[in-house]
Amino acid sequence: MNNALTRCPICQNELTITRLHCEACETSLEGRFMGGPFAHMTREQLDFIMTFIRCEGKLNRVEVELGLSYPTLRNRLHDIIRVLGYEPGKEETPDLAEDRRRQVLEDLDTGKLTADAAMRILRGEPV
């Protein structure tokens, strides 16, 4: 069985999945279906993800298996992260005012806050 195409071979526009079929019971569904977050990835990106998972996310093992340099692997991983709609290296923590951050660190230093509580505040989590 072949993987579904995501781009039109003629004009390169995005293809829409409109029919699903079960070979076991001959049921067919028609409509407009999403391909999922990995549908827009190239075969090379999907192969990288499979290798990455097989190597338990350890880039040094992926490096050996694929015979690629660490910077090349990081670039490929960053490309995949962008395809999924994220920006690599961007912290997902909320902006904390500088004076509030400084106060939290001072409270940690003086023992008014535990390390766990300070980390929660800095991450924007409830304490």
Image (spheres, rainbow, N blue to C red):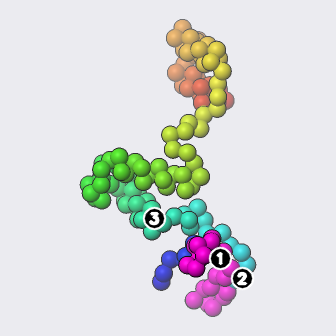
- Per the image, label 1 sits on a secondary structure element best described as strand
Which of the pair 49/123 is nearer the observer?
Answer: 49
Q: Nearer the viewer, mark 1 or mark 2?
A: 1
Q: Is residue 16 magenta?
A: yes
Residue at x-position 56% and y-position 11%: 106
Give the left or right position of residue 74, taking residue 79 as reference.
left
Examine the rendered structure and indicate whether residue 27 appears above or below residue 36: below
Picture coordinates of residue 83, whole percent (x, y): 55, 56
Badge 3: residue crowd in 10 Å (few <14, some 14–19, many ≥20): some
Give the residue number, with chain letter if any, for mark 2.
Answer: 30
Picture coordinates of residue 12, whole percent (x, y): 58, 72
Bounds of the magenta segment: 7-28
Q: Is residue 127 magenta?
A: no
Which of the pair 7/70 is nearer the observer?
Answer: 7
> Which dot marks residue 46?
3
> Which dot marks residue 17?
1
